[in-house]
Image (spheres, rainbow, N blue to C red):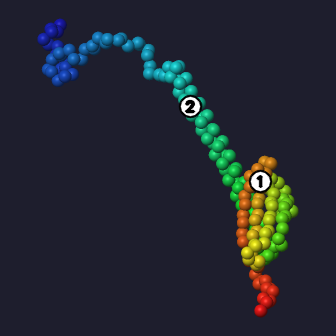
């Protein structure tokens, strides 16, 4: 049989040679539940889902606005390209006849630009007889409510014959 003096007590966790009571559990003010795990409550999950829903709605609205901007930019770029093409044709004519003309792009580009039409106005300069103003407007979009205009002044490459001045 062993006596109490023969059993050596292990040292305390605080470093003392004998047990001082630091390793004993302290009574908790709020006892722990035995099977309690860390988790989110249903209310927390519902609030998180609501925030995600609001953020996704805002992102989708922003995406729609971005797509509309891209479509408008593409339409405007096409109108500018078509107006420049008509202006190049007028430059090739050198000195287009004065007047008003209009049409669509079906003859030049069959079936490619159904929502685009053009108007060309050529006016003689009242001050300089060898200068013309060529103004081209391309209308586009639903009901042709949008337009792009291009104006250029052209000089007749062949000098005009002036009447002999009286002496």
Judge from the rendering whether residue 10 lies leftward or rightward of residue 46; answer left or right: left
Residue furthest left in the image:
5
Does 60 appear above or below 79?
above
Q: Which residue is mark 1?
A: 140
> Residue 30 placed where, x, y %?
35, 12
Which is closer to the viewer, label 2 or label 1? 1
Judge from the rendering whether residue 99 lies leftward or rightward of residue 154; answer left or right: right
Q: Which residue is mark 2?
A: 52
In the image, what residue occupies the spot 15% across and 17% down?
A: 18
> Residue 157 placed where, x, y %?
76, 81
Question: How many neighbours does mark 2 have within 10 angstroms: few (below 14), some (14-19), or many (20 or more)?
Answer: few
Nearer-the-camera pick, 77 or 34: 77
Does 161 appear above or below 79?
below
Residue 158, quarter of the rendered image: bottom right
> Residue 147 placed where, x, y %?
74, 55
Residue furthest front in the image:
167
In the image, what residue occupies the spot 78% across and 72% down?
A: 124
Question: How many neighbours does mark 1 have within 10 angstroms: few (below 14), some (14-19), or many (20 or more)?
Answer: many
- The Cα–Cα distance between marks 2 and 1, rounded to whole angstroms, is 40 Å
Split into 4 quadrants, where in the image is the C terminus?
Answer: bottom right
Label whose residue precedes the other's in the sequence (2 or 1): 2
Judge from the rendering whether residue 67 lies leftward or rightward of residue 22; answer left or right: right
In the image, what residue occupies the spot 61% across and 41% down?
A: 62
Split into 4 quadrants, where in the image is the N terminus?
Answer: top left
Nearer-the-camera pick, 51 or 128: 128
Residue 81, quarter of the rendered image: bottom right
Does 27 appear above or below 76?
above
- Judged from the image, the secondary structure of the residue bearing numbered disc 1 is strand
């Amino acid at each position: 049989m062993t006596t109490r003096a023969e059993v050596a007590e292990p040292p305390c966790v605080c470093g003392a040679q004998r047990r001082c009571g630091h390793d004993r559990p302290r009574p908790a003010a709020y006892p722990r539940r035995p099977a309690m795990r860390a988790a989110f409550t249903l209310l927390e999950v519902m609030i998180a889902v609501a925030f995600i829903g609001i953020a996704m709605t805002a992102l989708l609205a922003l995406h729609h606005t971005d797509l509309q901007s891209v479509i408008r930019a593409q339409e405007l770029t096409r109108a500018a390209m078509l107006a420049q093409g008509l202006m190049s044709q007028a430059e090739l004519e050198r000195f287009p006849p004065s007047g008003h003309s209009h049409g669509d792009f079906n003859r030049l580009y069959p079936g490619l630009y159904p929502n685009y039409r053009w108007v060309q106005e050529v006016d003689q300069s009242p001050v300089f007889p060898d200068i013309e103003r060529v103004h081209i407007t391309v209308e586009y979009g639903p009901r042709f409510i949008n337009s792009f205009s291009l104006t250029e002044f052209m000089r007749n490459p062949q000098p005009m014959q002036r009447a002999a001045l009286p002496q």
